[in-house]
Image (tube, rainbow, N blue to C red):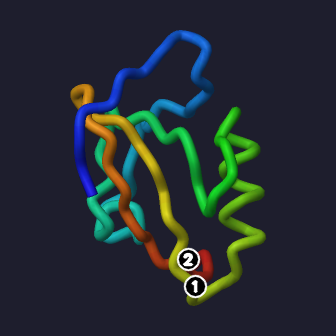
Amino acid sequence: MTGTWTVTPEDAGVLVSNVVAGSPAERSGIRVGDVIYEADGEPVTSAEALSQIVTLGGVENDIDVVLARDGARIVVEPRIERAP
């Protein structure tokens, strides 16, 4: 699901600065430079908040992640996996 999305300064979000090769994030299409605003229906206000949302999502479950890329709103569904 994509479309035009205006990001305003009051919007929270986390800038993606690294994506591990072969990770669920990479496989779902998350890229360096994306800004994640929502995960599993919850607003993402910090990296810690995102980590908590992912943890609560449960291993082997997909979560919806809403992000902005080049002014577009994008929804991806990474599958949560156990850390190696």
Q: Which residue shows up at 23% across the image and 42% down it?
A: 3
Q: Which of marks 1 and 2 is in front?
A: 1
Q: Which residue shows up at 69% across the image and 54% down it?
A: 51
Dot 2 falls on a residue whose secondary structure is loop
Q: Where is residue 17 in the image (x, y as percent from the top left)?
A: 42, 34
Q: Which amino acid does label 1 sit on?
A: Asn
Q: Where is residue 50 in the image (x, y as percent from the top left)?
A: 66, 49
Q: Which residue shows up at 54% across the image and 71% down it?
A: 63
Q: What residue type is labelled 2?
A: Ile
Q: Quadrant of the N terminus?
A: bottom left
Q: Quadrant of the C terminus?
A: bottom right
Dot 1 falls on a residue whose secondary structure is loop
Seen from the viewer's position, the closer of residues 32 and 45 is 45
Badge count: 2
The local crowd at label 1, few if under 14, some if 14 to 19, many if 20 or more residues have their Cα within 10 Å, is few
Judged left or right of residue 54, residue 66 is: left
Seen from the viewer's position, the closer of residues 60 and 12 is 12
Judged left or right of residue 34, residue 55 is: right
- Callout 1 touching callout 2 (CB < 8 Å): yes
* Label at residue 61: 1
The local crowd at label 2, few if under 14, some if 14 to 19, many if 20 or more residues have their Cα within 10 Å, is some
Mark 2 sits on what residue?
80
Between marks 1 and 2, how big is the CA–CA gap? 6 Å
Quadrant of residue 16 in the image?
Answer: top left
* Label at residue 17: none
